[in-house]
Image: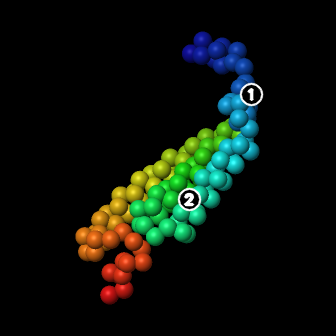
Amino acid sequence: MSMLYSLLAQAQPVEPSTVSQTTGVPLAWFLAVSAILFSLGFIGVLTRRNVLIIFMSAELMMNAVNLSLIAFGLQLNSMAGQNFVVFVVTVAAAEAAVGLAIILALVRQKPTIDTTDIDIMRQ
């Protein structure tokens, strides 16, 4: 037990590191890529009529948020960003399962994946 205390007494404190020190890439670049990915996903959700493309665009938006959470977590030297990412990925997996099940149910009722042709919920 005393050896453990002596090792702890000799340990040097860990200096906080930023994203640019860890990866060599500034935080602003990570945020710019994240903003571009989020914008592409948002435009895809707003402009497309194919249900699968809309679904993939929503996933792209979630991945953009994950990238920014990881970058901020590295910048702040905190694991909170990675913890949030694990939660978001879990929610995304559940959303993918439920979303694809709904899409399959809709396609079985009416063989189309165009959002303008789907009127099953109106009845």
Which picture quadrant has residue 18?
top right
Give the residue type that dot 2 points to.
Gly
- The answer to whether residue 28 shows anywhere in this view is yes
Of 35 and 53, which appears nearest the observer?
A: 53
Q: Which mark is residue 79?
A: none
Above or below, 26 relative to 99:
above
Left or right, 83 with respect to 93, comes to right
Q: Position of residue 114 (x, y in %)?
A: 39, 71
Above or below, 12 relative to 103:
above
| Residue found at x 65% / y 47% | 33
Residue ID for mark 1:
15
Residue ID for mark 2:
41
Kindly give the residue lying farthest to the bottom in the view shown.
123
| Residue found at x 74% / y 27% | 15
Of 90 and 32, which appears nearest the observer?
A: 32
* Rendered-image quadrant of the C terminus: bottom left
| Residue found at x 47% / y 64% | 54
Q: Position of residue 20 (x, y in %)?
A: 73, 34
- The answer to whether residue 72 shows anywhere in this view is no
Of 103 and 111, which appears nearest the observer?
A: 111
Give the residue type that dot 1 points to.
Glu
Marked residue nearer the N-terminal end (1 or 2): 1
Q: Position of residue 5 (x, y in %)?
A: 64, 17
Q: Of tags 1 and 2, which is closer to the observer?
A: 2
